Structures are given as structure tokens and as C-alpha cells.
Amino acid sequence: MSTKAIRIHAHGGPEVLRWEDMPTPEPGPGEALVHHEAVGLNYIDIYFRAGLYKIPHLPAILGLEGAGVVRAVGEGVTEVAVGDRVAYAGGPIGAYATERVIAADRLVKLPDSIDFATGAAMMLQGMTAQYLIRRTYRVQSGETVLVHAAAGGVGLILCQWAKHLGVRVIGVVSTEAKAELARAHGADHVVVGHQNLAAEVRRITDGAMVPVVYDGVGKDTFLPSLDCLAPLGLMVSYGNASGPVPPVEVGMLAAKGSLFLTRPTLATYTARREDLVAVANDLFAVVASGAVNIRVNQTFPLAEAAAAQEALEARRTTGSTVLIP
Ligand code: NDP
């Protein structure tokens, strides 16, 4: 049996992605073999490809998210069985493949009402949105929050989920077309570009500013984001789409109003299986109820993952993107 996979042999641009044949792996104790029906594309895939996030051994298969059917299980597996529809998000990398082996305790059963493409699109970005607004900073009805890259994968989910919870969202995007999309998914106000961001937030909030900023853009927006926070506000720096945030002078947090700063990861928030299942179930519930609509706005063949990554990096995508094996 053979598997097709996108592997990299060296870090670099999209050209390092290679579509290769490999032997189909066999599940060891506690593991399951998943046949992918769809694979999720995420910005973190670009960090791993480029070398911003380290890969211990090359060559390696990229990708952290997929949905499909369990084909085989190893000894001692209790969480899933052969034939189950499943989905997952999170390490280790290895999702850009027709099949993969993964620890069974990282899999969740995909509800019948959710198709594979939606499942592969929503797990990483949706579980991230869940922990950001339910745990990192538990938003309250009536509050106003700031969301960067509001028309992106995590962004469109955050906008809809926050709106569903009665929260007023100020989104930040780079184009008018993205502004329109963010508004259609719950953003009450959208700022195009971050040049005058603090002034815009001051105007929209009548000077109150916001208690939390969700910033996955990183380098370009870190300082403008701090200026949007109310005293004692929380800066949630959860990604680096524009590059990593430079070292922070801690005293700056005092000068700007006793601010808090966190750099959270999905891995921490779903490290225990009970947390993973709770986060996934919360996500499945808002998707099933229609409160959050997962927008799969781009689909590429898995073999063309390089083109998909190029589009994501060039800011040409909106919502979520899936790769079909
Ligand atoms: P997105 O779909 O949001 O794509 C990234 C977006 O970032 C772009 O569309 C663009 O929107 C914006 N952006 C701003 N500056 C740049 C730039 N210089 N280059 C490229 N894009 C830029 O991606 P995801 O939804 O997959 O991820 C969003 C962020 O969340 C990423 O930083 C990702 O790493 C992070 N993340 C973090 C997790 C965690 O647990 N910590 C988990 C999941 C995601 P615009 O054109 O509107 O500016």
C-alpha cells in the first residue's frame, strides 16, 4: 500500500513542497490510521515550511489538521474504531497526506451533520477561536473587542462567535472587499489598515478603548494593538502572519495602563484529552446551531498545496481553505 504526501526536504518558499509516494504507515499502540477526505490549510503550515517554527527531522510532511475515516487502529485504542468519521487539529505535523498515523487520543468523532471539508477547515481555526474567546479572555455580552485579520480563517469564526455571544466586534482588515465580508459575518465596525487604528478605536468606543485585542498578525500590529487597550486590558498575541513580534520592553505595559500580555497556543489549551473534547464539542455545537458558519472559501487539490500556501501568504484568501487528497 502506498500513500501520497506533500513533503519538504529543506526549509524555504512554496517551491520546497514536493508531492511524493511513501509507504502507508501502520498504527502502533495507541495510534490510528486515518484516511483523509480533506486536509486543513493553516498559517502555521507556512511557519513550519519557512523554518520560523523548527521541524526536528527533515524530510517531513507538513500539516496539522485533517478529517477522514479511521482505517486501522493499534493495540489499546479506545477513543475511536475502524470506520469512524473523525477530525483533528494539532501536532505532530504530518497531515498533508492521503493517509496518516496519529495518536488516537488526538482524534474526535466528527458529527454526521458536518461534512469532511468543513471538518478539516474548522478544527484548528475553530478550536482556536473557542479558547481565545471562552478561556484566554472570556468575553461578556455588551463588551467591545478588537479582532485583527477579521476576514481570515480564525477571524471570520471569531467575528461570528463573538456576535453570537452579544459582543460588539471591531475588525481590522486590509481591503474593502474583506471589510464587507467581515461585516457580513458579524463585525459591527471594520477598520481598513492599521495606520490610524487607536484613533479609530477611540472614536468607535467613545474613548473607552477595548478590554481585549486578538492579534494573529504579530510584528506589524503589536504596538498599534497595545494602544487600543483600556487600562488593565489584555493583549492576546496569538500569531505572526506579518512576522514574529520583536522582544517586548516589559515597562511599556506599565506605561500604557497596567496591561496584561499573553502568547497562547492551541496545544496548551487542548493538551489534556478532556479539554480537547470539550473545546471540540463547544465548536461543533455553534456550527450545528448555525451560529457559526464555516466559510470554506478556497479548495485546492492536496498535490497543489504550494499554490494554496502562496495564496494564503499573499493575503489572497478569505475564511478557510481546504486541500483535497
Ligand atoms: P488567516 O486566514 O487569518 O490569514 C492570515 C491573514 O493575516 C491574512 O489574510 C491577512 O489579512 C493578515 N495579514 C496581515 N499582515 C500580513 C502579512 N504581512 N502577510 C500575510 N498575512 C497578513 O490565517 P489563519 O486563520 O490560518 O491564522 C491566523 C493567525 O492565527 C495566524 O497568525 C496563525 O498563525 C494564528 N493561529 C494561532 C493559533 C494559536 O493557537 N496560537 C492557532 C491558529 C492560528 P488582511 O489582508 O486582512 O490583513
Image (cartoon, rainbow, N blue to C red):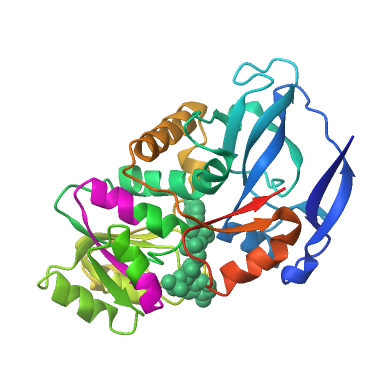
Query: Which of the 4 image quarters holds residue 87?
Result: top right
Q: Quadrant of the N terminus?
A: top right
For the image, the number of numbered tags is 0
Instruction: Please say whether residue 106 is visible from this viewpoint.
Output: yes
Residue at (82, 47) in percent of width and height: 4
Q: Position of residue 128 (x, y in %)?
A: 44, 48
Position above or below: 220 against 89? below
Q: Position of residue 292 (x, y in %)?
A: 36, 46
Q: Is residue 262 left or right of residue 198?
A: right
Residue 166 within the magenta-colored segment of the rendering: yes
Q: Position of residue 235 (x, y in %)?
A: 33, 61
Q: Nearer the viewer, residue 298 or 258?
A: 298
Position above or below: 74 against 312? above
Q: Is residue 36 left or right of residue 256?
A: right
Residue at (45, 31) in percent of width and height: 275
Q: Is residue 171 left or right of residue 62?
A: left
Q: Position of residue 6 (x, y in %)?
A: 78, 54
Position above or below: 81 against 149? above
Query: Which of the 4 image quarters holds residue 178?
Result: bottom left
Instruction: Please say whether residue 242 is visible from this viewpoint.
Output: no
Report the magenta residues as a range: 159-179
Residue 284 within the magenta-colored segment of the rendering: no
Residue at (78, 63) in percent of width and height: 17
Residue at (55, 29) in percent of width and height: 108
Q: Nearer the viewer, residue 141 or 58?
A: 141
**Farthest residue toward the bottom?**
195
